[in-house]
Image (cartoon, helix red, strand yellow):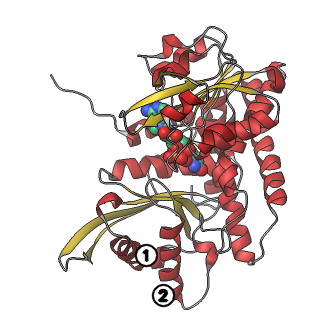
Amino acid sequence: MATTVYNPFASAQKQFDKTAEMLDLDKATSDLLRFPMKEFHFQFPIQMDDGSVKVFKAYRIQHNDARGPAKGGIRFHPQETADTIRALAMWMTWKTAVADIPLGGAKGGVICDPHDLSNYEQERICRAYVRHLSANLGPNVDIPSPEIMTNAQHMLWMLDEYETIKGQRLPGTLTGKPVGMGGSLGRKEATGYGVIINVREALKELGLEIDKTTASIQGFGNVAQYAIELFQQMGGKVICVSAWDQKEQKALAYRKKDGIILEELQSIADIFGGINKERAISLGYEILEGEKWIEQDVDILIPAALDNSITAENMQMISKNVKMLAEAANGPTSSEASNYIEERGIFTIPDFLANSGGVICSYFEQVQSNMNYYWEKEEVLSKLDTKITSAYISVSNFAMENDLNLRDAAYAIAVDRVARACHDRGWV
Ligand code: NAD
């Protein structure tokens, strides 16, 4: 029997088609936005540490730059495909548009597994990637950032190569750089805090007080930890988190019914967001199977780990008291589960609005890098709050005026903004 393989680009196009129909977009605009504007598929030879030469395949796909320079991460992944990068580039266009920052959407990748590469080999890959693309990158052209298996060090190698080619310092070419080397304060907090700023605004609309709400969170990485920090500062209580256990090769959930203590869990977590099970037990945490995070009797569920983690298989397990789903991860809810959650009347903050704090702060980093003048953390976080609150309110108002859910409203606003920019430029 033939099996259908999930194609992220087909899924991104399907979502776009639905929105284009809702907005009654003309054919030329739809044709333009259904596909990326430019694609670079290339390969380069790298001399390995043992003297052999290996050829690596790479991509950079710029979906649209009508609203500003293209923006999006570069991933290192052994199973990378052009269609994954196409989809991610398109989603970046919608994310920057819904956040209303003057940037477009792009994504890139190299087919490789950094686990099998030395630092020197990774450095050579970064430099070769930029050498092949230098004419099509830059602070006013396309601005990459870290993504899966790339980090601040990779960005610095890429920046150094770019600046060497151009013969000048151009720190606004890449974001995700370390603080002190062109990075922005507040970046590590930005995505998690942004999720909770959205939650705060949504709770106001539902007439709920944040300091009387409880949450259960999937994941204990960068996004989850800062989401917990701000949620707790606002008086909310997190009773359960889940994380991947490397030793047991499965996810586990850690529950404390009076509320987990963030600093305590951070003190027994590793840099990948894994939690030491034995030490958690000694600190009084109940250890449950990983899936149990979804069954908790809480007001808010926050998936902040993986895509496709709420599906037809587990959606029925969501407790009857859950009122809100804040999609911190990218694509955490399958389309079947999304429909079910909507029918249940659970209020969903869609991923590309919920986690837009990261790209908003990357934009702030780029602005600071271009000026070569860096803001205090308070200033960054206050600007982040203003930007996300305003994005949330626009989406929510549009949803109410047009009787839409937040996801469809966010797509409609984003696609409309990009379509208008293309039109105003005289492209279509
Ligand atoms: P991370 O790598 O720092 O943390 C991932 C966490 O998920 C870890 O705690 C890990 O143990 C946990 N995990 C992995 N598999 C799990 C499983 N099966 N069950 C439960 N937990 C599991 O990642 P992150 O940066 O926090 O990103 C989390 C999600 O948010 C991803 O989907 C990412 O694409 C998305 N996102 C991140 C950012 C950002 O700025 N970091 C921005 C936008 C979107």
- Would you say the beta carbon of the disc 2 residue lies within 8 angstroms of ligand 1? no
Q: Position of residue 305 (x, y in %)?
A: 51, 37
Q: Tag 2: residue type?
A: Ile
Q: Is residue 382 left or right of residue 261?
A: right
Seen at 50% across and 88% down, the residue is 164
| Disc 1 to disc 2, C-alpha distance | 9 Å
Q: Residues within 10 Å of mark 1 (few under 14, many from 20)?
A: some
Q: Residues within 10 Å of mark 2 (few under 14, many from 20)?
A: few
Residue that badge 2 annotates: 165
Q: Residue at x 64, y 63 (%)?
A: 68
Q: Is mark 1 within 8 Å of ligand 1?
A: no
Q: Identify whether 276 is placed above or below 400.
A: below
The percent position of residue 42, horizontal first and vertical second, equals: 31, 68
Q: What residue is shown at x 47% (from left), y 82% (from top)?
A: 161
Query: Which corner quadrant holds the C terminus?
Result: bottom right
Identify the residue at the far front of this view: 282
Q: Please indicate, yes or no, whether residue 51 appears anywhere in the rendered image.
A: yes
Q: Residue furthest left?
A: 1
Q: Is residue 90 above or below residue 7?
A: below
Q: What's the amino acid at mark 1? A: Val
Residue sitting nearer the eye, 204 or 193: 193
Label 1 close to label 2 by CB (< 8 Å): yes
Front one among 380 and 132: 380
Residue indicated by mark 1: 130
Q: Secondary structure at mark 2?
A: helix
Query: Helix or strand or loop: what does disc 1 sit on?
Result: helix
The quadrant of the image that shows the N terminus is top left
Res. 266 mark: none
